[in-house]
C-alpha cells in the first residue's frame, strides 16, 4: 500500500513541476503585448492598402491595357482619337509597296487592315504580335504612325524546330 | 539557447565580423559565376531564331530584374523586424539594400530599353510592366531620400520601414502585370509551375548569371552595410576595439 502511495505522490509531484515549467516557458515565449500590436498594425496597413489599391486597379482595369484588340473596335462608330491597337499579324497578309507596309491585325475573332509608312522593327513578321499607334481613316483603314513588334516568351536556337511550340 | 542564437544576428558587432570574414569568398564566387555565365552566354550559347544576337542582353536584364524585386521583398522582411522588435541592424540593412536595389532596378530598366530599340521598335512604352518597374525605381529613390532628410536617425529608420511596408503593394502588381493587362512586355519565360519556355542551352548560362548576381549583390551589401554601420555607430565603445 505504502509503495503505491509514494508512487502516486511522486507522479503528481512530477506532473506539477512539468506543468509549472511549461507555464513559465509559455510566459517567456509569449510576445510582448506592444510587439503584438505593432505586428497587427503592419498587417492592418497591408490589408487596407491592398483593398484600396485593388479598387483603384479594378476601376482602371481597361485603361491600364496598353492597346485595344481588333474585336473591341466597334465598326459602326469608329474611335476618332489616336489609339493603340494590338494583335497578331495575319498569315500571308504583309505586303510591301515602296515605303508602305500593308497588313492585317487579328485577334482570331476580329480583323483590322493597317497601313504603315516606314521601317518596321526586326521582329515584325507574320504570325507574331504587333502593336500600332494611329487613327482610323474614313474607309476603315487604320493608318499607323508608329509600329511596335511584340516578342513572345519563347527563346529557341535556330536549328530546333520552332513550329513545334507554336502548334501546341 | 535559442534566444541567444537569434540575438547574435541582431548585433552589429557580430555582423561586421562575419562580413569581413565572408566578403572575399562571396565576392570571388560572384566573379567566377559571372565570368562563367557571361562567357558561356555571350560566346558559346546559340543565337535566338527570332532575335539573333540581341537576345543576349537577357544575361544582364533577367538577373537585375529578378533582384530588383527580390531585394525589396527582403527589405520588407527587415522592415517588419525593425518595426516590431526595434532591431537597429535591420534598419542599417534596409538602407544598404535600398542602394543596391536602386542600382539593380536602374540596370533592369536600362538594359530593357536598349533591348527594346531593335526588337520592339521603341525604347519606352507606358505599359503596365515598365511603368510599375519605374515606380519601384522611384520607390527606392524615395526611401533613400526620406531616410537622408532627417537628423533624428531613430525616427527616419522607423519612417523608412513604414514606407518599405507600404511599397510592398507594388511587388505583386509588377509580377502579375503581364498577366492581368495587355502589355508590350512579354510574359515570364521562367515560372515555377511550367518548364521554362527558353531553350536549355540558353537557360543554363542564364541561371549561372542569376546566381552570380546574387553573390555580387550580397558582397556589395556587405560593403554598403559596413559603411553605414561604421558611420551610425561611431560613438559606441565597441567601434574603438573593432577599428
Image (cartoon, coloured by chain):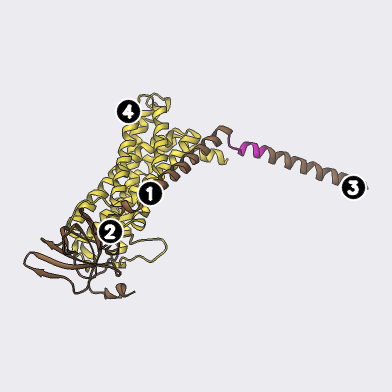
Chain identifier, brown in the render: A
Which residue does the numbered mark 1 point to in the structure image? A59
Q: Residue A40 magenta-drawn? A: no
Compare residues B33 and A61 and report the one nearer the observer.
A61
Residue furthest toward the left? A98
Chain of the residue under label 4: B
Looking at the rendered structure, whether the residues under marks 3 and 1 are on a common chain is answered as yes
Q: Which residue corresponds to mark 3?
A: A3
Secondary structure of residue under mark 4: loop
Quadrant in which the C terminus of chain B appears: top left
Bounds of the magenta segment: A24-32
Marks 3 and 2 belong to one chain: yes
Whether B83 is drawn above or below A167: the answer is above
| Position in image of residue B129 (x %, y %) | 31, 52
Sequence order check: which comes first, mark 1 or mark 2?
A: 1
Dot 4 corresponds to which residue? B149
Q: Which of the pair A124/B109 is nearer the observer?
A: A124
Which chain shows up in yellow?
B
Check disc 1 and report its element: helix, strand or loop.
helix
CA gap, disc 3 and disc 4: 76 Å
- Per the image, the residue denoted by label 2 is A68
- Residue A37, by quadrant, is top right
Q: Chain of mark 2?
A: A
Question: Is the residue A132 above or below the residue B126 in the image?
Answer: below
| Residue A60 visible, this orientation | yes
- The image position of residue A147, as x and y in percent, is 17, 59
Amino acid at each position: 500500500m505504502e509503495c503505491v502511495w509514494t508512487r502516486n505522490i511522486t507522479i503528481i509531484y512530477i506532473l506539477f513541476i512539468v506543468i509549472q515549467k511549461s507555464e513559465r516557458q509559455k510566459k517567456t515565449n509569449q510576445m510582448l503585448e506592444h510587439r503584438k500590436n505593432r505586428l497587427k498594425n503592419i498587417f492592418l496597413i497591408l490589408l487596407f492598402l491592398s483593398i484600396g489599391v485593388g479598387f483603384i486597379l479594378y476601376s482602371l482595369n481597361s485603361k491600364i491595357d496598353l492597346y485595344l484588340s481588333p474585336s473591341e473596335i466597334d465598326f459602326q462608330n469608329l474611335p476618332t482619337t489616336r489609339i493603340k491597337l494590338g494583335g497578331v499579324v495575319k498569315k500571308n497578309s504583309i505586303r510591301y509597296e515602296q515605303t508602305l507596309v500593308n497588313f492585317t491585325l487579328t485577334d482570331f475573332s476580329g480583323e483590322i487592315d493597317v497601313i504603315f509608312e516606314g521601317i518596321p522593327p526586326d521582329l515584325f513578321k507574320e504570325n507574331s504580335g504587333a502593336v500600332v499607334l494611329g487613327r482610323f481613316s474614313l474607309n476603315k483603314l487604320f493608318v499607323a504612325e508608329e509600329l511596335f513588334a511584340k516578342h513572345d516568351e519563347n527563346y529557341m536556337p535556330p536549328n530546333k524546330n520552332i513550329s513545334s511550340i507554336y502548334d501546341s | 539557447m535559442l534566444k541567444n542564437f537569434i540575438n547574435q544576428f541582431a548585433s552589429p558587432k557580430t555582423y561586421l565580423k562575419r562580413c569581413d570574414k565572408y566578403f572575399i569568398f562571396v565576392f570571388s564566387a560572384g566573379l567566377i559565376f559571372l565570368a562563367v555565365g557571361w562567357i558561356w552566354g555571350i560566346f558559346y550559347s546559340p543565337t535566338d531564331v527570332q532575335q539573333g544576337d540581341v537576345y543576349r542582353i537577357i544575361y544582364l536584364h533577367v538577373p537585375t530584374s529578378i533582384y530588383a524585386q527580390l531585394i525589396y521583398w527582403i527589405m520588407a522582411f527587415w522592415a517588419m523586424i525593425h518595426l516590431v522588435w526595434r532591431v537597429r541592424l535591420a534598419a542599417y540593412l534596409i538602407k544598404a539594400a535600398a542602394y543596391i536595389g536602386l542600382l539593380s532596378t536602374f540596370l533592369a530598366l536600362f538594359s530593357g530599353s536598349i533591348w527594346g530599340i531593335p526588337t520592339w521598335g521603341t525604347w519606352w512604352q507606358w505599359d503596365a510592366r515598365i511603368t510599375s518597374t519605374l515606380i519601384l525605381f522611384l520607390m527606392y529613390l524615395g526611401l533613400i531620400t526620406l531616410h537622408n532628410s532627417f537628423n533624428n536617425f531613430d525616427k527616419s529608420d522607423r519612417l523608412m520601414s513604414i514606407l518599405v511596408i507600404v511599397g510592398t503593394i507594388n511587388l505583386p502588381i509588377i509580377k502579375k502585370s503581364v498577366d492581368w493587362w495587355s502589355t508590350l512586355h512579354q510574359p515570364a519565360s521562367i515560372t515555377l509551375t511550367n518548364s521554362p519556355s527558353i531553350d536549355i542551352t540558353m537557360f543554363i548560362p542564364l541561371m549561372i548569371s542569376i546566381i552570380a548576381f546574387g553573390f555580387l549583390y550580397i558582397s556589395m551589401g556587405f560593403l554598403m552595410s559596413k559603411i553605414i554601420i561604421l558611420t551610425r555607430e561611431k560613438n559606441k565603445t565597441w567601434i574603438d576595439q573593432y577599428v
